[in-house]
Structures are given as structure tokens and as C-alpha cells.
Image (cartoon, rainbow, N blue to C red):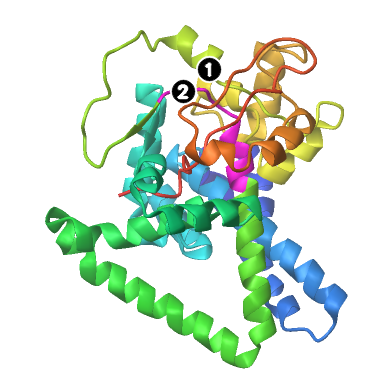
Amino acid sequence: MLRKHFRYPDGVLPNVLALAYTLAGYPIGIMLLLNPSGWVNGIGTLLLAHVLVYSAYFIHEFAHNTIFKTPIANTHWGTLMSWLNGSCYAPFADLRRKHMRHHVDRADVITFDSKQFLHASPAWFRKLILALEWAYIPAVEIIMHVYVMAIPFLVPERKQARLRIIAIFLLRAAVFLALGVISPKALALYFIAYVLFLTVLRFADAYQHTYDAFAMLGADRIPNDKLRDHAYEQSNTYSNLVSLKYPWLNLLLLNFPYHNAHHEKPAVPWHRLPTLHRELFGEGYEQIIPMRLLLAGFHTYRVKRVLSDDYGVVTTGTNKAAAFYGAVGVSFLTAV
């Protein structure tokens, strides 16, 4: 019976299991945050963070219509996932449109130029953001989410979205206020889980491309300053696999690290990406950068990448990511 709803027959079981984990894990995680035991709180924080990660990557899948047969079903489920992780201030259609431009334009089409914004900000504010980033608080990502909420009040052409933003904010604020009244500790732990969630997403996003980044609100075209063809796409895309030795660990990120395979065939669902990757590239593909090679750079360049004019460079050899600063502010969860 379920097969008639899912796009791929072999996707029924993995999607049912993964979606059930996401939907059940969210309330279970919150209940664990309310438990008086500290170690139970720790489990709840990690569970909640991981569920939020899954909700984000499912948004990506729904944007590509890889889960259900009908676009409307993918849209409804994508919207539900956005409510779980707080990206609901942007309509799902906008999230999808922005991400499709990433594929079509072969560029990082961003909502807001955080680097220009910080350079133009007062020195005290810029230093505050850099201090938070130094302390592993994803301040730039938070600014991006706030900007999505603020843009209808900053740009008159977007004023029709103001009531929607206000309604969503009041509803979510009331829910979190209630959680804080019940347990201030649980609210604080929820914030920690959310920071972990943003950090995991930004770590994955940071090292999947060395594309050019363009900030634009509407349907503006990117500059025709270079040939952005299929060869450019693959040579500027990287598969930052969680593990080469244990491929199942990539399920922690819903196989999102198989990024070259995804860009080669964007309509292939998450559960088929490992097989597609092996068929197309194998284990020795030069665009593979295991995450163990990126952890040191993520730490070393955590402040530098915030204001850097580029993403650094990827070289060759065993330490090819040593000068790869990574991207910042390119999340597919922020769109206007």
C-alpha cells in the first residue's frame, strides 16, 4: 500500500524508518531534556541535534522530489521538516527555488552576503561575531536565519510576508516560552542541540564546493564571467565522506556527503547514493576528501573563513585540504 505513495519501490523501507526516526525522535528528545538525570539529558541533546540534522537533509530530498511520487506530497513533508528545524520562516517553495539555482547555475547562490555585512558593521559588532565563531557558536548561520525573518520588514516589496513571519514567530516563541517555564534547563539544552545541529550542517556545507558565491534576492542572473559547465561542476565539488572504511557512517548525514554523485544525478535518492558513487567514481576518486582531513581545518580556520574572500584551495596528496578554509553562510535552509 505504501508503495503507491513513494517514488522508488526500494525507498519505502529506508524512508519509512528514517522519517519515523525523525518524527518520533523530536518529541522523545525533548522529553529526555526534561528528565532530571544529567546523562539522560545528554542523550536527549544528542538525539535532538541528530533529528534536526535529519530534518534538514530530508528538506533537501523533498526539494529534489526524491521521496514521494507527487510534488505536492514532497512539498507538504518538506514544510513539516522546516517547522521542526526552524527554517519555516521561508516558504518551502523558496527553499527549493534557491537550492535549484545552486544546481542550475553551478554557484553558491546565497541570500545574504554575510562577509560584506560584517565588513560594513561597527567594529564592536564584527569583533563580537568573530569571538562567537572562535567559541564555536555559529553566529553567521544565526544571522542568516534572522535575516530571513527580517527581510520582509527591510524590503517594501516583501511586505506581504510580514504577517506570516509575525504569526510563525509568535507561535514558536510561545512554545519555547512554555518549555522554558516548565524547565529552564531543558530550554538551555535545546539551544545547545540547535547549535550542534547548525554546526554539523555548516561543517558539511563548508567543504562540498569551491564555487563562486553570489548574493541575490530575486531572479538576477549570475555573471557570465567563466564557463560553468559539467566539468567545472565536478571539479569544484567534493565528497566529504564521514568514512571510507565504514560507509554506513555516512547515514549519520543521510548520505549527503556523497556530493559528487548527487550533483551527477540530482534525482537519485539518498539511499541509492553510495551505490551510485561506487559505480561512477570508486574509492580512489580525487574529489573525495574524508572528514578526518577536514576537522583540523574546520578548527584552524573557524575565524578566517568568516571574512575570507575565497574558500581557500584544494591541492593533491594526502594533505590536500590543508589550505581549504571552507565556505560560510551557504546553508540551503535560508532563503528569501
Residue at 53%, 88% (x, y): give it. 178
Was residue 210 drawn as part of the magenta stretch in this picture?
yes
* Label 2 Cα crowd, 10 Å radius (few <14 / some 14-19 / many 20+): many
Q: Amino acid at mark 2?
A: Tyr
Residue at 22%, 67% (x, y): give it. 162
Query: Which residue lies most toward the left here?
Result: 157
Query: SS at mark 1?
Result: loop
* Mark 2 lies on residue: 211
CB atoms of marks 2 and 1 within 8 Å: yes
Residue at 67%, 20% (x, y): give it. 277
**Does label 2 or label 1 sit earlier along the sequence?**
2
- Left-right relation of 17 to 159: right
Q: Find residue 132 and report its image quarter.
A: bottom right
Q: Find residue 189 and report its image quarter.
A: bottom right
- Per the rendering, the mark at residue 236 is 1
- Pick whichever, 250 or 190, lies toward us: 190
Residue at 64%, 86% (x, y): give it. 184
Q: Amino acid at mark 1?
A: Asn
Say whether residue 78 is visible: yes
Question: Over which residues does the magenta segment extend?
Answer: 201-212
